[in-house]
Image (cartoon, helix red, strand yellow):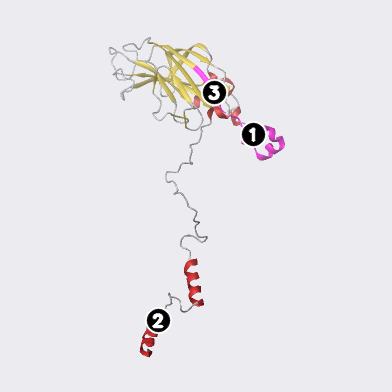
Amino acid sequence: MNQAMFAAGSDRLGYVLKPEELRHAKHLPIADILADGLEHKEKKGKKLVKFDVNVISAQRLPRPRNTSTEGGMNPYVEVEMYCADEKSLDTARGEGGTNASARDGMLGIGSPLRHRTRIIEGNGFDPQFNTRLALSVQTKHQSLIFVRWTVWNSPEANSTSTNNTLLATFTAKLDSLQQGLRHIPLFNPNGEQYRDAKLFVKIHKEAPVALSSDDYTRQLPDLSGSPRPEPPRTGRTWPRFGIFSRSTSERRRREQLADPRGSLSRTSSIERTFLSDVR
């Protein structure tokens, strides 16, 4: 992916600038923001990016190591889309093929949108896939969308098997891909290009569409209903100093001092014995 970042366009030679969306006013020094004024502090929102990838066929795929020349190959192609946004839910969509994305539906750094073509059994020379994949994503970093093609061989003719072998791969930025029918070069896991192995695909890209905040902002859950609702209050009000306030005992002590003959007089045991003897 790092090689794909600088493999085409104006990013190939010389000094490379950050993507335009990262050269925003909020990323500049505060002195520059104050000097330019508030009109440059507008926050950029997300954009909806759509593109189609029609995986038509492959030519002369490399044979896995330690396999006999008589054994057939069962290749399939996996198309992945990476974006630079933080992981989020329901920001990407994919149609066509078999969905092999994460089960939790998260998309972001380290968690791509992944779709697979059907398996072509017994043909590694010129397999015909003819699988159209329609991918879309909501992102703030449209120039940091990467697409990766990975060709696998499935000895058991099952794309979910753990014995599948990686044959070849190719990664490119979406901005670097040209539309129309294209032959895509393939590379081995060490980054070395195969001389004859290629993928034949058709790419179609739509212009990004700006989204309003209502289109992609999630509604926060309603927290007004507490799992432990408070009991309904009556006309009684709680004491000012809390439930364990000492105001009642202090009030009672003041009443006893004002009326020593009260019913709650605390006469000591010695005084009670003396009074009984006198009587």
User: Looking at the rendering, in which quadrant would you find the C terminus?
Assistant: bottom left
Assess disc 2: are there few (<14), some (14-19) or many (≥20) residues with their C-alpha within 10 Å of its C-alpha.
few
Q: Helix, strand, or loop for circle 2? A: loop
User: Residue most toward the front?
Assistant: 279
Amino acid at pointer 3: Leu
128 vs 39, left or right, is left
Mark 3 Cα shell of 10 Å, populated few (<14), some (14-19), many (≥20): some
Residue found 54% across the figure and 23% down from its top: 48
**Image x and y of residue 164, in percent:** 33, 22
Relative depth, front residue between 243 and 170? 243
Which span of residues is magenta-colored?
A: 26-51
**Residue 228, percent from left and from top:** 42, 46
Do residues under tags 1 and 3 come within 8 Å of each other at their CB atoms?
no
For label 3, the SS is: strand
The answer to which of marks 1 and 3 sits earlier in the sequence is 1
Task: Determine crowd level at label 1: few under 14, some 14-19, many 20+ residues with C-alpha closer than 10 A.
Answer: some
Q: Earlier in the sequence, mark 1 or mark 2?
A: 1
Q: According to the image, label 1 marks what residue? A: 25
Q: What amino acid is found at the position of numbered circle 2 in the picture?
A: Ser
Image coordinates of residue 40 in percent, x first then y, are: 67, 32
Question: What kind of residue is marked 1?
Answer: Ala
Circle nearer the viewer, 2 or 3? 2
Measured Cα–Cα span from mark 2 to mark 3: 87 Å
Regarding residue 140, the answer to whether it shows in the image is no
Q: Determine the CA span between mark 1 and mark 3.
A: 22 Å
Which mark, residue 48? 3
Whether 42 is among the magenta residues is: yes
